[in-house]
Image: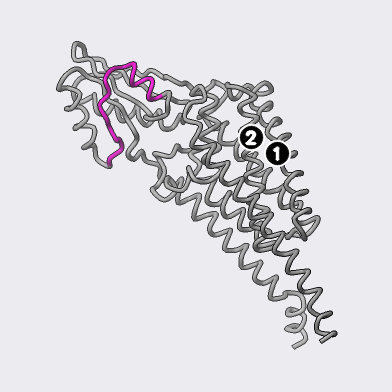
């Protein structure tokens, strides 16, 4: 009996719920990462086909019927259009067929993901071999030699995301998970913004001038990093304002458990299962990884969608944080006034 009483005193219902929550996050982490990454296969990869006359439609039909539907082929007018669409990130590769010879050209972009570029090369080689044809691979947007498997952009964004939710979590732990009034909420958001600016600059300098891992504009990566850090931090502040300390766990669920494996880092989006492919572009890690690769390897093309996603998270997080702090201030004021009113009645 004494031991049972000690256990009840040591493990409160709130602590028990938090332990259960941590266990759930642990299992979700395993399920999400293993589920997304254990068996990558290309599926409906946007892919161009260039060939003269009827040969183009015939090749498109042949590629569309491949087992497992690895490609989503579409006929393009000429090699120049194929290159441009790859640089605009509308397609991930293209096959240029030369009926006058026995060698065709495969265009890929390893800057968008080395694993996907290699998978397209394997598919094209397998298609051509039975017809006694060979493939010459041309990398239109090659990954940097210092960027192994094209992972640097992903790890850069993961670092920024970690910084965002840790900054917000530290502010909560040090001064209460829910800001007492809008003024304190604004102070937290300002501190977060200043930290985001510094974190964005630091990350851009490390992967660029210091390590030479990513090419591209340092200023553009700096701006992206500041937005990633702030958007993740603002969402974490909002979740804490809504749910208290539990908000930290919800941020981990959203950013780490759901966001990281679906971001297209280790395996680009077309190689992920449908669920992770669907949610990845809408979450900060996926939007940030896409934008970082666009800046580094695709001349800044196809940035607007990813930047809009990050901006929406930042705005929603900011507004919710301010609204919930105003609600709490009003609630605290009403609670303080109610007893006084009762005494005078």
Is residue 193 positioned above or below 326 on the image? Answer: above
- Mark 1 and mark 2 residues within 8 Å of each other at the beta carbon: yes
Q: Say if the magenta span includes residue 111.
A: no
Query: In percent of the image, x 56 and y 32: which residue is there?
Result: 153
Q: Which residues are magenta?
A: 69-86
Foreground of the two, 135 or 186:
186
Residue carrying label 1:
196
Whether residue 337 sits left or right of residue 283 in the image: it is right
Q: At which x and y percent is residue 145?
A: 54, 20
Q: Say if the magenta span includes residue 73.
A: yes
Colour option used: one colour
* Mark 2 nearby-residue class (10 Å; few <14, some 14–19, many ≥20): many
Whether residue 208 sits left or right of residue 301 in the image: it is right
Q: How many marks?
A: 2
> Most extreme residue toward the front, as rendered?
345
Question: Residue 225: which disc?
Answer: 2
Is residue 155 positioned above or below 22 on the image? Answer: above
Foreground of the two, 311 or 161:
311
């Amino acid at each position: 009996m004494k031991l049972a009483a000690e256990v009840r005193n040591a493990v409160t219902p709130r602590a028990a719920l938090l332990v259960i929550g941590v266990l759930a996050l642990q299992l979700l982490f395993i399920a999400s990462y293993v589920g997304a990454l254990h068996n990558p296969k290309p599926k409906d990869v946007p892919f161009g086909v260039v060939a003269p006359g009827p040969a183009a439609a015939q090749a498109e039909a042949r590629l569309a019927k491949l087992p497992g539907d690895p490609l989503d082929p579409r006929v393009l007018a000429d090699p120049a259009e194929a290159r441009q669409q790859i640089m605009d990130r509308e397609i991930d590769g293209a096959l240029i067929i030369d009926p006058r010879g026995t060698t065709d050209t495969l265009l890929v972009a390893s800057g968008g993901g080395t694993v996907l570029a290699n998978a397209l090369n394997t598919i094209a080689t397998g298609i051509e071999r039975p017809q006694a044809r060979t493939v010459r691979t041309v990398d239109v947007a090659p990954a940097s030699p210092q960027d192994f498997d094209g992972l640097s952009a992903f790890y850069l964004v993961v670092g920024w995301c970690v910084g965002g939710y840790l900054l917000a979590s530290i502010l909560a732990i040090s001064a209460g998970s829910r800001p007492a009034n809008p003024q304190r909420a604004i102070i937290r958001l300002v501190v977060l913004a200043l930290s985001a600016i510094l974190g964005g600059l630091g990350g851009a300098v490390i992967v660029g001038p210091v390590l030479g891992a990513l090419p591209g504009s340092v200023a553009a990566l700096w701006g992206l990093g500041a937005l990633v850090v702030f958007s993740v931090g603002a969402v974490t502040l909002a979740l804490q304002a809504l749910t208290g300390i539990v908000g930290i766990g919800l941020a981990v669920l959203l950013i780490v458990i759901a966001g990281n494996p679906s971001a297209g880092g280790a395996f680009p989006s077309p190689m992920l299962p449908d669920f992770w492919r669907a949610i990845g572009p809408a979450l900060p890690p996926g939007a940030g990884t896409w934008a970082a690769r666009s800046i580094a390897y695709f001349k800044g093309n196809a940035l607007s969608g990813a930047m809009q996603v990050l901006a929406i998270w930042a705005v929603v997080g900011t507004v919710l944080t301010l609204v919930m702090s105003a609600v709490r201030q009003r609630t605290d004021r009403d609670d303080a006034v109610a007893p006084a009113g009762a005494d005078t009645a």
